[in-house]
Structures are given as C-alpha cells and as structure tokens.
Amino acid sequence: MSLVKLAYQKLYPDSEFPYDAKVSYSGRFSDYNAKVIRQGNSLEFRLSRKWLTVSEEIKLGLIQHLLLRLGNDRRSTFYTDLYSKFVKNLHISVGKTESEPELLASFSRVNDEFFHGTIEQPNLRWGSESVRKLASYDYQSDTITVSSVFLDEPEKLLDYVMFHELLHKALKFRDSGTKTIHHSSKFRQLESSYPGHEALEKALERLARKNRIADWL
C-alpha cells in the first residue's frame, strides 16, 4: 500500500481512497520542506530528499498534514503530532554553517539581554534587498534570514528584527489542521514588551514602504 493511501485511510477509515497519488523526492527543496500539488483527481507529494531517511510514522504525519490542509480539515492525529514534534526539534540536528558577522553580533546581544543566553545559535544569513520579507525564520533549516536593507540601518532596528525571529525559534508554532499559528497571543505579548516597541514598529513600516517589502515572518 502506498504511503499516501495509508495516510488517507488512517484519516478517513470509512472512505474509499479517491486519488491517483505519487510521492517524489527532490534536491531542489530546502531541508525537510514539502508540498502537495492537486490536478483534478491526481495528487503529487513533492518532498525534500532529507525525508528519505525519516521514519514512516513521521512521514505519515507529514502526508496527513498536507492532506488535512488540502481538505480544509482542522483535525490533528497521532501522526500529525509526531510530525509537528519532529519539525520543532529539527534545530537540534541541523548543521550550523552560516554566520554573518553583523547578524552574529546582533544575535549575541539579543540572546544575552532577552533570553539569558539560552537560545542555541541558528544559521544567520543575509537575504537580498529585493526579497519580499524583512526577515524570516525557517524551522526546517534552523535559519534566520534578514533582508540586507538592514546593513545600512541602525543597530537597534536590526536587534528588534532579530528578537522577533528568535521568538519564533523559542516559541515554535502550533498546528491546528488547516492553520499553522506562528504569532500566538504569547508571541504578541512578548514582542510588545520589547523596549521602544511602538516606535520600532513604525520605523519598520517606513522601511518596508521605502523598499517595497510586503511583510515579514
């Protein structure tokens, strides 16, 4: 039985499997990323090659996670919980090979002042000035990417962005079937407690408009 069919039957034991499905592995994805593409009655699950060595139970959770999103189903299962726990702990085993000096200095300042030095250093990477986001944290590769527009901005603004991304690393996310919640009420509460929060948010809004950057994560 195929992995997709098994995942579907464990989700919907009283339903016939309605799809022509296949799973493919690609080196073009970043580590442990995946997506599903539906065309009519066909489903293609495209997974990073890193998934080849992961246990079947966790891969079942990944497939179920994608199926639930596809069907706008908010449930969680034993397998999707396994998948979420796996992703949340990937940072432990991911190699740390990128460490830009300016970002490392910012990480050290913010980690020491606001997290008591308890946050493990992630990969730290500059992005392009033309990227869509101010900054982002990728759970699968344990990487913080910051738009290079901050190379010319005050240190305090970079540190605020670093704080935002380290909150993602510290608090992780919550899965509710069709929705992954990254900015929880606790996240927003901690973010708003940062010294000068409102003024820094306004400075970021001006910077985003100036550089036509749409969002950040």
Image (tube, grey):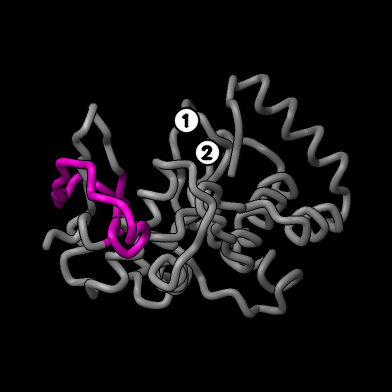
| Figure disc tally | 2
User: In the rendering, at what x and y percent does residue 109 appear?
Assistant: 68, 66
Q: Which mark is residue 25?
A: none
Query: Residue 79, located in which quarter of the rendered image?
Result: bottom left
Vertical comparison of 215 with 106: above or below? above
167 magenta-colored: no
Under circle 1, the secondary element is loop
Under circle 2, the secondary element is strand
Label 2: few (<14), some (14–19) or many (≥20) C-alpha neighbours in 10 Å: many
The type of residue carrying mark 2 is Ser
Vertical comparison of 147 with 2: above or below? above
Q: Residue at x 78, y 55 (%)?
A: 191
The type of residue carrying mark 1 is Val
Q: Residue at x 23, y 52 (%)?
A: 47
**Mark 1 lies on residue:** 131
Residue 99 in sight from this viewpoint: no
Residue 68 in sight from this viewpoint: yes
Q: Residue at x 75, y 49 (%)?
A: 156
Which span is picked out in magenta? Answer: 7-35
Quadrant (top left/top right/bottom left/bottom right) for the C terminus: top right
Query: Residue 115, located in which quarter of the rendered image?
Result: bottom right
18 magenta-colored: yes
**Mark 2 lies on residue:** 147
Q: Residue at x 67, y 51 (%)?
A: 183
Quadrant (top left/top right/bottom left/bottom right) for the N terminus: bottom left
Q: Are marks 1 and 2 in contact (CB under 8 Å)?
A: yes
> Residue at the front extreme?
14
User: In the rendering, at what x and y percent does residue 72 appear?
Assistant: 48, 42
